[in-house]
Image: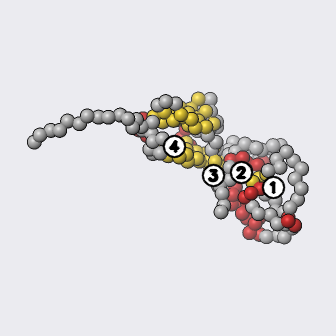
Amino acid sequence: MLKKKSFFERLTGSMRMDDEEVSDDQKKPVNSMHSGLKSKIPLSSKDDSKEGSDWLAEEEEEGELTVDVYQTAHEIVVQSMIAGVQPEHLSITITRDLITIKGKREVARGINEDNYFIKELYWGSFSRTISLPNEVEAEDAEAVEKHGLLTIKLPKINKDKQTVLKVKSS
């Protein structure tokens, strides 16, 4: 089963070792501090045009947004770094038990690719859908961005709240 790659894996072009089975003749010693990661360069010497086109298709996929999710007594809080994203390129969708954050970070135009020495920042579309641990009041949610940190506060549904309903006679 193909798993969606993490933001780090997309950024660095690496893979988890358990994502792909490698035969004994394809194994090579790993001498780096990232011993749990594997390069996207095929280990076999065969030239397979299908493999070469797969990594190009992956470049066009969305990045996965990194988040912190925690709770207080009355709300669930979602935080994420979205520095460089214009508000009009950000979309937040909330249901009672899910939140989806989508956006796009536009690449700086006018810089020739040949002028880069290092290019590690993630540019392009990203998204993240989070299953919430409690149901929330989507209508009362609020989102604030300050210094590149997006903070979304989702009030929990109070399941102990009771309402007394009066019966009308007709």
Counting residues from the start of the chain, the first of labels 4 and 3 encountered is 3
Q: Residue at 51% x, 42% y: name it.
A: 133
Q: Residue at 65% x, 49% y: name it.
A: 63
Counting residues from the start of the chain, the first of labels 2 and 1 encountered is 2
Q: Closer to the observer: label 4 or label 3? A: 4
Q: Residue at 39% x, 38% y: name it.
A: 159
Residue under label 2: 10
Report the amino acid beneath label 2.
Answer: Arg
| Residues under numbered marks 2 and 1 in contact, where contact means CB atoms less than 8 Å apart | no
Give me the C-alpha separation between circle 2 and circle 3.
Answer: 9 Å
Residue under label 1: 39
Most foreground residue, 112 or 60: 60
Report the amino acid beneath label 4.
Answer: Leu
Tag of residue 132? 4
Report the amino acid beneath label 1.
Answer: Ser
| Residue 149 % position (x, y) | 61, 33
| Residues under numbered marks 1 and 4 in contact, where contact means CB atoms less than 8 Å apart | no
Q: Residue furthest left?
A: 170
> Dot 1: few (<14), some (14–19), or many (≥20) neighbours within 10 Å?
few
Secondary structure under tag 1 reads: strand
Whether residue 117 is visible, yes or no, is yes
Give the answer, above or below, for where 93 lies relative to 60: above
Residue under label 3: 62
Counting residues from the start of the chain, the first of labels 2 and 4 encountered is 2
Secondary structure under tag 3 reads: loop
Give me the C-alpha separation between circle 2 and circle 4.
Answer: 25 Å
Whether residue 109 is visible, yes or no, is no
Counting residues from the start of the chain, the first of labels 3 and 1 encountered is 1
Q: Closer to the observer: label 2 or label 4? A: 4
Q: Closer to the observer: label 3 or label 1? A: 1
